[in-house]
Structures are given as C-alpha cells and as structure tokens.
Image (spheres, rainbow, N blue to C red):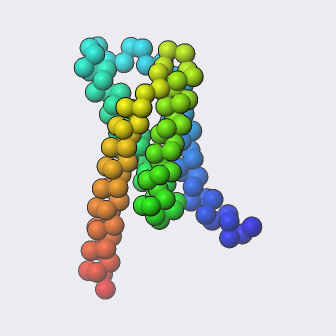
C-alpha cells in the first residue's frame, strides 16, 4: 500500500486538471467571441492549452511519453463524448485532433524542460 501511494499522489495534479476540463466541458460556450473567427480561435486555443497541460501533468506522473500520449488522447476522446451529452454542446472528432496537437505541444515542452534540466545538471557538476 505504501508503494502505491506515491504513484497515486503523482497523478493527483493530472486528475484535478481532468476535473477542471470536465467542468469546462459542461459549460455553455454561448457568448464566447464576438465573431465566428474570434470564437473559433478562442475555443481552439483552449483545446491546445488544456491538452498540452494535461500531457505535461500525466508525463510527470508516468515519466513515460509512450504512456502519456495515449492516456491523454483517451481523455480527449472521452471529453468529446461527454460534450455530446451536454445540452448546447457538440462532441467533434476534429476537436480531438486539435487536442492531439496540444499533446504534441506538451511533448515539445517536456523536451525543452528536460534539455534545460540536463544542461543545468551538467554545469553544476
């Protein structure tokens, strides 16, 4: 039980972020943006940010890109399904592709962070 607890604790930030995404997906998007273009840009930017952050949080929990990408994308698929059940919202497969782009941004962020940490570690030794 003690060995399982630290691993679970590492997932807490990701789980909390998933709850936040779920909450946002339950809300109406009416009134976002003054034009169709503004609305599109705002909502799709949210997708990119949400899933870049979620990927990073899942990566920190698993320390594995091979596990983090599918876990994050699976959540994106479930989120779009959830949105299809919310009155006034639609679940769209194309949104999961934008979510996947956010995941790739998260992969890039992790590579940058790891590179910085690696160079800091080399200079301190």
Considering only vertical position in the picture, is 29 above or below 105? above
Closer-to-camera residue (18/72): 72
Q: Position of residue 42 (x, y in %)?
A: 32, 27
55 sits left or right of 105 in the view:
right
Image quarter for residue 10?
A: bottom right
Image quarter for residue 33?
A: top left
Residue at left 51%, top 62%? 62
65 sits left or right of 71 in the view:
left
123 sits left or right of 13 in the view:
left
Which image quarter is the N terminus in? bottom right
Residue lying at the far bottom in this picture: please name it: 125
Considering only vertical position in the picture, is 57 above or below 91? below
Q: Position of residue 123 (x, y in %)?
A: 26, 80
Image quarter for residue 47?
A: top left
Residue at left 47%, top 48%? 72
Does residue 49 appear in this view?
no
Residue at left 32%, top 34%? 45
Closer-to-camera residue (85/38): 85
Q: How many marks?
A: 0
Residue lying at the far right in this picture: please name it: 1
Q: Position of residue 96 (x, y in %)?
A: 41, 36
Residue at left 51%, top 34%? 79
Does residue 26 appear in this view?
yes
Which image quarter is the C terminus in? bottom left
């Amino acid at each position: 039980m003690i060995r399982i607890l630290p691993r679970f604790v590492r997932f807490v930030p990701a789980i909390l972020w998933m709850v936040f995404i779920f909450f946002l997906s339950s809300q109406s998007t009416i009134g976002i943006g003054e034009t169709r273009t503004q609305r599109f840009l705002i909502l799709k930017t949210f997708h990119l940010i949400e899933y870049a952050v979620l990927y990073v949080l899942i990566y920190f929990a698993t320390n594995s890109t091979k596990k983090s990408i599918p876990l994050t994308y699976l959540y994106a698929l479930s989120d779009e399904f959830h949105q299809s059940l919310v009155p006034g919202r639609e679940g769209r497969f194309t949104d999961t592709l934008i979510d996947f782009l956010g995941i790739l941004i998260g992969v890039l962020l992790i590579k940058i962070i790891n590179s910085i940490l690696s160079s800091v570690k080399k200079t301190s030794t």
